[in-house]
Image (cartoon, rainbow, N blue to C red):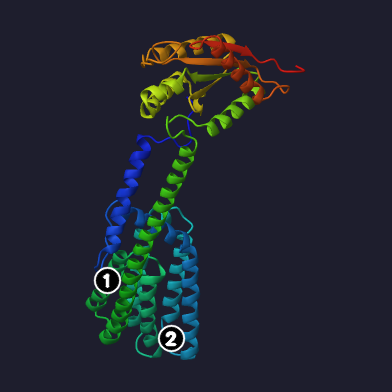
Amino acid sequence: MDVLPDSPGSTNSLADEARNREYRIILSQLRRRGLWMTLPEPLETAFCRQHDERAATAFSSTATTIFVLYASLGIAALVLTGGRGLGYWPVSFGVFLVFILIAWLLSFTTLIHARYQQVVASLAAVAVAVAVVHPHLLGSGGIQHLVHEGTIYVMVIVYLGLNLRFWYAVSAATLAGGTAFLVTWLSGVDMQWQLGIATYGGGSALGMVLRFRDEQRERRIFLHTRLLALDNQRIQVLAGELERLSFLDGLTGVANRRYFDTTLEKHWRACLRDNRPLTLVMLDVDFFKAYNDHYGHQDGDQCLRTIAQTLSRQAARPQDLAARYGGEEFALVFPDADAAAAEQLVSRILDAVRQLELPHAVSEASDVVTLSAGVATIVPTVHATVEDLVKAADQALYDAKNAGRNCWRLRQVRALNA
């Protein structure tokens, strides 16, 4: 039969159940109190994927910003020292510039999107190691203190500027920095432990706290965004269900008059375009008022529901439609059915209702519930209208009633000026 919009099914029910389960999980996570928010799967994977994709997309601009900041720090160092006592600093400064350039070039590769955390954490680890080691290679002087202080900027960039997730940032900074200190000490380099640990440690502590805070906020924003998406999905599902219900007859569950009118017009246009036949069957429950008076309205309603279900089964093809036209009257639409096919269809429909054997003690046509039917067929043309087809079916139904009911009559519509 013609499928109503957004018909519910098992797939939708399973989707609704999954959405509701995810909704409850998210709410429970947002209510939790604690320092660290670890999301259950698959939310954790979804968060990581979304976070990394955004970070990877922004990495080229991030690398550009880091380059500008680093160049500005270099210019400031030259101004403050007056270009004196630089030692190997220009070389180490140039190495960092090359390193930043490599990172910028990597931002345009697919690798950065596929393995953002691993690639950028590795780059960050190298940057931290160099930042920790190279101040101790410059000897004493103002430039060494400036480079030491620059380590703070490196740590803050690692924790905040690169959009690394917390544990990746901590691992890169801690392991690289600790390894660099150890290597420098074992190699016998003159270490300024107090200054090095203060700058590296202070920058790490500041960056770690800020990265931790920001990731917790990002996780909460992710959950709130997901809740909003689920709410939007619910609204769309409810809107679809409301639309579907607006096309259903509340008593019988088949299509209502509104949907019948819309669908008949749609099939008329399609058959007109393709020069195909169209059949309309109008049906009326024989002596239904007497049935209601005798058996009561509850039994009358159940009778209509049973008949509607039977008619719906008879409208078996996807393009067919069974609808309640009004009161005890029903309508069936059969595209691609000519007069010969219509005769077989309506005979089968009336037999199917008789075989229900619903008792009708006050009927003048039979001792069971029966139908009268009016059938109209047409090959739509520009000289005819949908109203012509409906009028012909209604007249055929009138003919069937005059013929004693429990029967059908057919009229073929002749278009004027055809």
**Seen in the image, is 293 located left or right of residue 169?**
right
- 231 vs 46, nearest the viewer: 231
Residue 10, x across and y down, in percent:
35, 35
Q: Relative to 28, is 294 above or below?
A: above
- Say which amino acid is labelled 2: Leu
Label 2 packing within 10 angstroms: few (<14), some (14-19), many (20+): some
The quadrant of the image that shows the C terminus is top right
Q: Relative to 283, is 239 above or below?
A: below
Label number found at residue 174: 1
**Residue under label 2:** 86
Residue furthest out toward the right: 417
Residue 76, x across and y down, in percent:
48, 85
Residue 246, x across and y down, in percent:
49, 39
Mark 2 to mark 1: distance in Å? 28 Å
Badge 1 marks a residue whose secondary structure is helix
Badge 2 marks a residue whose secondary structure is loop
- 281 vs 175, nearest the viewer: 281
Label number found at residue 88: none
Residue 185 in view, yes or no: yes
Q: Relative to 370, is 52 above or below?
A: below
- 72 vs 37, nearest the viewer: 37
Name which residue lies at 39% across and 13% down.
Answer: 368
